[in-house]
Image (cartoon, coloured by chain):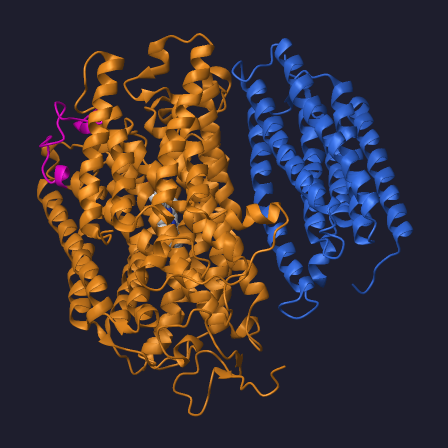
Chain colours: A orange, B blue
Amino acid sequence: MKKNTVGSGLLLLFVAGAIGYGLGLGFDALINGAPNFSGSTSAAFALLFAVSAFFFGLYGYRGITRGLVWQVVGTLAGGLFISGIRALMGYKFSEIFGSFFFSEPAWVFGALVGVISFLSGVGVMDDWMKWVRGIDTHDHHEDEPGWEKYFSVSLDHKVIGIQYTVTALVLISVGGLFALIFRTELAYSQLQFLTTTFKLFNQNGPQIYNSLMSLHGMIMIVSILLGVSGIINYVVPLLIGAHDMAFPRMNAFAYWIAVPASVLLLMSLVLGGFDTGWTGYPPLSARAPVGVQMFFLGVFTAGWSSILGALNVIATVIRMRAKGMNAMRMPIFVWAAIATSIIALTATQLIGLSFQLVMFQRLFGMGFFDPAKGGNPVLFQHLFWFYSHPAVYVFVLPGLGIISELLPVFARKPLFGYRWIAMSSLGIALVGFVVWAHHMFTSGMNEYLRVPFMYSTMLVAIPTGVKFFSWVATLWKGKIETPTPMLFVLGAIFVFLLGGITGPPNAMVALDLHLHDTYWVVGHFHDTIFGGFVFPFFASIYYWYPKATGRRMNEFWGKVHFWLMTPSFLILTFGMMYIGLLGMRRRIVDYDAALGFDPTHLVMTICAFGIALSVLIFFINFFHSMKNGEKAEGNVWNSRSPEWQVPSPMPAHNYEVPFEVVGEPYDYGLPGSKYVQFITPTKKK
Amino acid sequence: MTHKHDKSSAFSQGVLIFVYLAVLTAVEFFVAVKLNSIQIMLLIALVKAGLVMYYYMHIYKLNTSDEGDEHSYSFKSGTNRIGLWMFLLSDSFVFGGLLVMRFNLLGLTRPHLDQNLGLLVTAVLLISSFFMNRAETSIEHGDRKGFVTNIIITLILGIGFLLGVVAVEWPRAIEEGITASSNTVGAAFFMMTGMHAFHVLTGVIFLLIVLRNGAKGLYDKHSYPVEAAAVYWHFVDLVWIFFYPALYLIGVVAG
Ligand code: HEM
Ligand SMILES: [Cu+2]
């Protein structure tokens, strides 16, 4: 048999995509009388076939490929099942099949069956099914050597961590690509290529703009959640000296459920898209095309990844720390992971619930948010933001933890105010639960709620300020080294500062009434998210890459990445805030030339491409260094942390000899001090 | 296990708690009819919830989870216990959200439902919790037969509750004109009872699995799976402690 390669994967992708497209056109001809070349049916089939075929060529019929094939079959079977029932119930043919192929209930049910089929197909529930039948399973699984283990179920937290990270990078690229497309349209006023005559996936140009913009938001958020899980999964067990996570099967499950979720998010684009933005507010989302259902279901599914992952992290940290690692001697990143997980574990349920209620409103006519039936659209916003505000801390707390974790290593000084930093993470997480309505100052909610929420929001600035104070104090008079990871850490601090100081103005009711829904807000949150997630995420990839591969990424190209991305990004968000203050609305495809925004928009578009180029450089560096990077098997960064005291890459079951905590984690520069000591196996039974 | 009660005292504790819960439910019902005081109903619900969490769900066991070395069964069960409670914490946010939805949309009105039927299904679920507790105590004391009998009774009652809600209460509500799509009263009613019934259903499946494996003797020594099933089952009961007054007792009937 021929060896599987990326080449054969790509070949099959095009072949199967073409077959799916043709099939879809055929169905279109049958259903609607004529094939629709820019329709949804052909696109849906092409997408489903192409994705599975790509992995078939790359990897053969096992692991992820089996999952995807089962998902396709499950989706179609579920859809046909509902269509059959509808036929029996006496629905007309045109109500069973239409321009989206299936009817809406059929798509929703099919998608649900598809997700479950994926999970059975990929085999992540096999052990549980054995337990149900009373059969015991082994705790230690052996993975295949080499890259192939990453495409099948593995229970090793390091493999899962890398699976998460790479999936996050893939989604970042997809989301980024979407952004480039609509950013290009915005470069000049008037419609250039997303015009009203442009047709794709049953949508015209402006509609495609809305769908891409909405999906950009949510795909980026999912990719952030996965990236956060990736770093936490890889690093936390190593930092606390555990041999794995507390529940390895659930860990694998939490990763794999994110894959069909991503497929659903893409499906939403081809099934007519939706025009609500990532927030999916009804009544708009109650009227959007069927794509919005795929979006809701995809987010719902991805939410379970987040919930179960968080549960696992908390259990692991509670139960599996090394000897002597009491709460105040945990690496600071572990505190951040805990704070994040508390939010993800609990609040995530409410975005799931709010989306589920809209889904049911659409499917069964239940009038939760429909004023005509006594419903209340503002209720949706409360449920939604009860998650989605705390969620922003899910994005940034781990990143802030990375900053605190790496800063002492490269400043060669103790972390200033360890306890304060640890507590500030928890403080941010807890205060974050009571500020949600600051997104709703203009929504028509009860007016007396505005002021309390304004004050509670301002409170968040205090623990955040604590972190900045500590970072600055840690850098103060340090012997600062600036290899690539440290550059990204410093960049993160600066960019997050900009994000942080643009927050309080939004929290002031009087100002927010003007700022709300302008590009100013868009600038604010891009600063927070880049400073709190993107920069630290890159920092941690550059930093822990040698741990995972035994080689380091190229320094020169790492620095090029940084020095290209940072100024491009800063100009981009300054531009956003500038025109936002002058009245540029967010989430619109066009603007009036008389506003004079054209030059700024053009600059912003150029900068967006600058960021894309820098990330492309990162990708090349990332893959190229795996084989060709400079060998780095020792303590590359001269760190005190336990994972660097053993040679890289990390062996499959982590530390062969357990360690014990004998000192403070960040006493850099204190002669003779040590954080961990390996327990020499004297009394082995 | 350090402090293992003997079986009969564990049984009688179960009876006592059951009596407390039953009396409190009756009081709650009369408070609703006579006084219609939300504060008292809330207080009663909280007391009931506390009793269930402590005596039936053994929340205190979370503290004793550190026994044994890292690879022992008791340590692993301790980890699983922490995981299960976190899952329930997470799940309770869904039900909390549903309560928020109900009070936001309906305020102090409630759907027009059959009070006798409501009291009946509530009683059935409560009694099932009692037998669940007996089943758990039995297997922990190595009484496999008692376990099987009690869990079958639990199952029958659980399925009885499910049918009572889905096969009797729902059609009746629809006859009364309370449908999912008519107005928010119907929407809230079907959403809440539906989500709860879904959890009862998963509990029934969980119990069936435990019954099958327990009858084979797989849990004679290591009975954590039974404990987990029991805790989950009581959690479903716990949710109903709040849903029952929210749907049947609080407020005035919506016109
Ligand atoms: C001191 C800290 C912060 C304050 C006071 C603050 C305040 C606000 C306020 C009041 C809004 C609503 C503006 C409007 O829509 O009119 C907002 C929007 C937003 N913030 Fe922040 N924020 C802070 C930090 C963060 C962080 C750390 C993140 C993310 C990681 C973040 C992400 C967002 C996002 C995504 C939105 C826009 C949501 C949307 O409408 O799509 N913020 N912020
Ligand atoms: Cu917010």
Q: Residue at x 9, y 37 (%)?
A: A188
**Location of residue A414 by image quarter:** bottom left
Residue A366 visible in the displayed image: yes
Q: Identify the main secondary structure in magenta.
A: loop
Q: Pick whichever, A319 or B72, lies toward us.
A: B72
B248 versus A465 height, above or below: above
Residue A450 magenta-highlighted: no
Residue A195 magenta-highlighted: yes
A659 versus B79 height, above or below: below
Residue A566 visible in the displayed image: no
Residue B34: x and y in percent read: 81, 23
Q: For the magenta stretch, what is the residue range?
A: A184-206
- Asked if residue A318 lies left or right of residue A435, the reply is right
Of all residues, the one furthest to the front in this rendering is A1
A556 versus A577 height, above or below: below
Image mark count: 0
Residue A496: x and y in percent read: 31, 59
Residue A540: x and y in percent read: 33, 66
Q: Pick whichever, B188 or A157, lies toward us.
A: A157
- Asked if residue A545 lies left or right of residue A605, the reply is right
- Asked if residue A592 lies left or right of residue A165, the reply is left
Location of the C terminus of chain A by quadrant is: bottom right
Q: Residue at x 41, y 63 (%)?
A: A158
A368 versus A231 height, above or below: above
Q: Residue at x 51, y 18 (%)?
A: A374
Residue B11: x and y in percent read: 87, 47
**Location of residue A281 by image quarter:** top left
